[in-house]
Image (cartoon, rainbow, N blue to C red):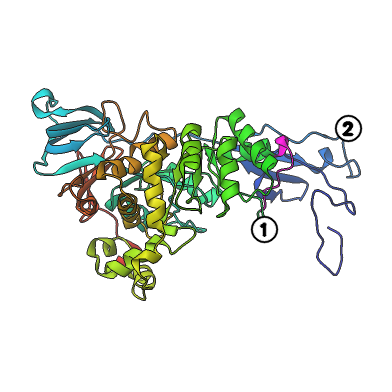
Amino acid sequence: MPKTGQAVTIGPSTTDYPIKKLTRDAGSYLCWSGDSKTLYWSLGPELFSRDLTNAFSFVPGAKDSVQEKPDTVGISIGFTAPFDAPSGALALEGATVVTMKGDEVLSNATIVVEGNRISAVGPAESVQIPSGAKRIDVRGKYIVPGFIDVHAHGNFGSWTPLTNWIYYANLAFGVTTMHDPSSSTDMVFSNSELIKSGNMVGPHLYSTGSILYGAEGSFKAIVNNFDDAMSHLRRLKAVGAFSVKSYNQPRRDQRQQIIEAARALNMLVVPEGGSTFFWNLTMVLDGHTGIEHNVPISPLYKDVVELVTHSKTGLTPTLIVHYSGLFGENYWYQNTKVWENEQLLKYTPRAIIDSRSRRRMMAEEDDYSYFTTSRSMKKVLDAGGKVQLGAHGQIQGIGAHWELWMLQQGGMTPLEALRCATLNGAQYLGMDADLGSLENGKVADLIVMDKNPLENIRNSESIRYTMANGRLYDVNTMNEVGTRVKERERFWWER
């Protein structure tokens, strides 16, 4: 580096110093060799390196012809680990089961789980329970599919404890799948793999990784052409993303280039309109997978409802952080004593609950404009469109129930609201072949409730057991109680 008395700015447009682009898309964990002659970096499961003699012709010992093209293929340093799944068979007997196959509700039903998949579900008299299966009596209880939170910020920092209260809080409240549309790329995908391998306990975890942010900032994603868009999506797909978040890309052609790259790479694009109605409409017209956060104008009239419906664009209104009015989150602080919720406090540090809920904002109910948005979501459903649940990570676990209840407040039936929390979310993420309903062959994700949520949606909180990936948890302790009995490790505040 040049010896100067000031900072040296280096970037793609620098002309004062020799600049060489070494990699096509991106690089992480940059590291020099001990003699400072070779640079190393990685991208996903590949390790790259470049000797300076193969980068600059003026370096002593430089090759006659230095490498001009950026590297695209590295050395594979990936490895495989067994996917975690329980062994043996388990039968849940006697419950009323809301399968999400249409409007199907089965009385006195039996669900058989073998490994991490449902092998049978139906009326008790029609289901044969395998010999040696563990049988659990759930008569008088109600079973629905596990909740799918498609906008679930996990608040990842620079480290994550192996016993992560965020994951346990979500499981304890029935959230079995989280999709985080803005997260630390390094942390979220490593956590996802730790959960898949059984080294951490948590819901199925997916993410866009870091957002493709178009506004000025420390991590701006520059998209000026299709090649730029492809580069951004390739680097995120390399680390495990199947979706990307297009956020505040200012020009429509930039957003369209991201969509076209996603089509080429078979990825989803979930954008935010930044509370800008016209951006939202062009996002629908251009073919985005869905719209994250509510369209900021309400009520929605027939023209917008039909546009959204016929485009098959999913809407994730996140009423809990509502644009154009007071957050729905504050409605529940105002109307319930959250800091007295013993189940929530088992899995969330009290300081977080107290700081968010005890000094509450009070407002008249008609100041909460999310009711109007919720009624618009009912219009979209009635027209044949899709609405899914996203709780924004405002308050882990119970926030998904608040979002569910707010969807129902707009006129949805309890079953329709539950479908937004289950099957619609699975369809939005392209995972409905495995998740979202209780059917033979699907992943065993389900919630056992003491009270009937179809009679009163607020009964969704009466959870007795959560099953995620075939593993059954007693939500009073979050100990595993299925075919394997295993105590939960203590949280940091319990030590």
Q: Which of marks 1 and 2 is nearer the N terminus?
A: 2
Q: Position of residue 128 (x, y in %)?
A: 12, 24
Vertical side of 455 occupied by 424: above or below: above
Q: Mark 1 points at which residue?
A: 218
Q: Determine the CA span between mark 1 and mark 2.
A: 36 Å
Return the residue nearer the eye: 370 or 130: 370
Q: Where is residue 488 in the image (x, y as percent from the top left)?
A: 27, 53
Residue displayed at 44% across by 37% down: 429
172 magenta-colored: no
Q: Is residue 168 shown to the viewer in this render?
A: no
Vertical side of 113 occupied by 464: above or below: below
Q: Position of residue 327 (x, y in %)?
A: 42, 62
Is residue 120 left or right of 83 when viewed as pictured? left
Q: Where is residue 110 in the image (x, y as percent from the top left)?
A: 14, 32
Q: Name the residue under label 2.
A: 65
Of the residues shown, which amino acid type is indicated by label 2?
Answer: Ser
Residue displayed at 83% across by 35% down: 68
Q: Is residue 325 shown to the viewer in this render?
A: yes
Residue 442, located in which quarter of the rendered image? top left
225 magenta-colored: yes
Q: Residues within 10 Å of mark 1 (few under 14, many from 20)?
A: few
State the extent of the magenta-drawn residues as a range: 220-228
